[in-house]
Image (cartoon, rainbow, N blue to C red):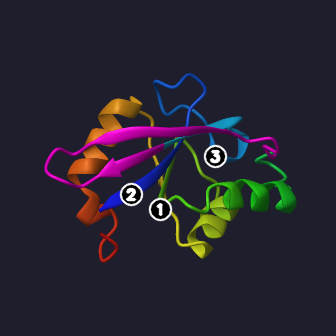
Amino acid sequence: MICRVAVASSDGKIINQQFGRAGQFLVFDVSETEDKTVQFVVLRENKLPFNARQPDEEALAATVNMLADCQLVLANRIGLKALAALCAKGIIALEITDFIDDTLEKVANSLRRILPGRV
C-alpha cells in the first residue's frame, strides 16, 4: 500500500513551515512494502498562504483542496481551523520539526499505526 504525504518545507530538507504559511508542499509516496520505498512525486506551490492570526477561509480551502489526494500532511505547526479542515477531508495532520528523510523513513515503518484501517 502507498501513502501520499505532503510536507511543508521551505528548503526540501527539513519540515520547517507552518501549514497556513507554507509557500510550498513537497509530495511523496511512501510504501509499506518490504523495501519501504519513499519516492518524491511533485512540488506543489501554495499560491494562497493565509495569515494564521486571521485565517482566510478561501485560502485555507484552496490549500486543503490542493492536498486532497494526500493521506498525511506534515508541518511544524498546524492551527485548529486547518486541522479541522484537513480532518474533514480525511487527511491526517501531524506537527513535527525534523529532517524530511528521517521522518518519511519513520512513516514508512509506522504506516499501520499512523493510518490504522487504511493500509
**Quarter placement of the C terminus:** bottom left
| Mark 1: amino acid | Gln
Question: For the point 28% across and 59% down, which residue is it?
Answer: 111
In the image, is 5 to the left or to the right of 33?
right
User: Rounded to the nearest whole Å, what is the CA distance between mark 3 and mark 2?
Assistant: 19 Å
Which residue is the site of mark 3? Answer: 19
Closest to the observer, 94 or 39: 39
User: Rounded to the nearest whole Å, what is the CA distance between mark 3 and mark 1?
Assistant: 15 Å
- Neighbour class for label 3 at 10 Å: few (<14), some, many (≥20)? many
Q: Earlier in the sequence, mark 3 or mark 2?
A: 2
Which residue is the site of mark 1? Answer: 71
Which residue is the site of mark 2? Answer: 3
Q: Are marks 2 and 1 in contact (CB under 8 Å)?
A: yes
Question: For the point 72% across and 40% down, which residue is it?
Answer: 21
Asked if 5 appears above or below 116 in the picture, the reply is above
**Quarter placement of the N terminus:** bottom left
Secondary element at tag 2: strand
